[in-house]
Image: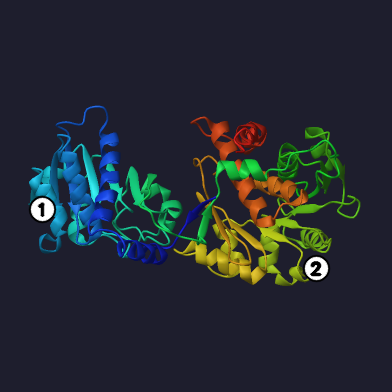
Amino acid sequence: MQGIWTTERIRAAEERLLAVTEEGALMRRAAFGVAVQAARMLGDRVRGRRVVLLVGAGNNGGDALWAGAFLRRRGVAVTAVLLNPDQAHPAGLAALRKAGGRVVTAEDGPSRIVTADLVIDGIVGLGARGPLRKEAAGLAAHIAAPVLSVDLPSGVDPDNGSVSGPAITAARTVTFGARKPVHVLNPRHCGEVVLVDIGLELTDPDLRLIEAADVGRLWPLPGPDDNKYSQGVVGIAAGSPAYPGAAVLASGAAVRATSGMVRYAGPAADAVRAAWPEVVATGSVTDAGRVQAWVAGPGIGTGHEGRGVLEQVLAAGVPVCADADATTLMANRPDVLDARDPGTPLVLTPHAGEFARLTGGEPGPDRVAAVREAARKFDAVVLLKGHTTVIAAPDGRVLVNVAHGSWLATAGSGDVLSGMIGALLASGLDPWLAAGAATYVHSLAADLSARGVPTSASGVLFTIPVALRRLLSRKT
């Protein structure tokens, strides 16, 4: 898994490295990485192309100026627009001027910006908070070319990715030493994130980004001594006469996620049997037989019958993935959680609206802190859905998954995810990792199913094996 560290810890690590590094060497190393990425964005023909640097005070401005100096050596026409001329990085400014770069003030910036082939954003760094100030926002409004941001897009909060006003939207962001929370919590403004190693020493990341190789290693596969029971038996308590599709999707996802056996319990048994003949379907949780995990909630309703189903599942003493109507029931009647055996693993999978009902408040700009707090409150793994999905364990561990696209914004996709999580829970996988691995495959399956055009939850469901085949071939 790729580690992600808060800006406070990154800056402390930078200070330690600066103390044992020749003055200016670290900035030049970082700036060279920016220049390399700028040249790649300019394409095959670099000489004669026009690059504008938006330069603020501090080290990010210095990085941009040094990058401009390196680009000048390759024949790029570089103009630096100084937002704070008196506070521009002295060494970086001298290097750019020596290389033949132009320097203008903000008043002359717009005419340069509109003709640029590439804009390098060095306005603010990790210490900044809040939106772009008026002068910077005015310059940003003239940008028509792709933007390469230094460390982070200016105007975006570095630790929670929130945007409260004017901000830069980058096509690519070059960051140094390690990824920061902004890079995974706000991919829309960061664009592609490129990491330049500058030798930072960091341990115990604050967040973890789950990657393909992780999922390949985690996903349970049958061995020569396995049978349908040892692979994991998952129960699905979902659907109703009004919403049989939720049962079909959740059950099918558990099947496609390679569960050893899927037992369905509910009023949509006939629909489930018709769609998935390998599922053992009964009319109630009581008649379902033994399982190693339950999925409860999709389409069960929020009335008396739904509550009874949820209480039975929570009392079963096995891990539970509670989704959709189950989270609403918990929000409306918190005492339903009294049926849960203390310590029994529970995974909650709310979207933002369900999260607000469960916790009594919107996730807010700091989604990581909000999910961590909810995980502690419910003593459960909490998975907050979104383009960047945040998954927190009760002990404070946090996984994030950045979606491959926006194709999962479609009815029924959550039912598919819950079925996949249930299959992994039944296999005995740690609930936090089960939620993370299922989310990654869910997102990849959506991307493969869509192929550039909108897809459906059924399309995602049937593409799960394709996604797994790709991931399992990259286990090392």
Name the amino acid, label 2.
Asp
Query: Which one is in front, 69 or 228?
Result: 69
Q: Residue at x 41, y 54 (%)?
A: 178
Query: Which one is in front, 296 or 380?
Result: 380
What secondary structure is found at the residue carrying circle 1?
helix
Q: CA distance from mark 1 to mark 2?
A: 67 Å
Which disc number belongs to residue 94? 1
The answer to whether 121 is drawn above or below residue 460 in the figure is: below
In the rendered image, residue 18, in percent from the top left (x then y), is placed at: 30, 62
Q: Nearer the viewer, mark 1 or mark 2?
A: 1
Count residues near mark 2 (Cα–Cα under 10 Å), then give few for <14, some for 14-19, many for 20+: few
Q: Which residue is mark 2?
A: 341
Q: Residue at x 24, y 39 (%)?
A: 145
- Residue 219 visible in the shown view: yes
Q: Residue at x 8, y 47 (%)?
A: 98
Q: Residue furthest top?
A: 44
Q: Residue at x 75, y 44 (%)?
A: 247
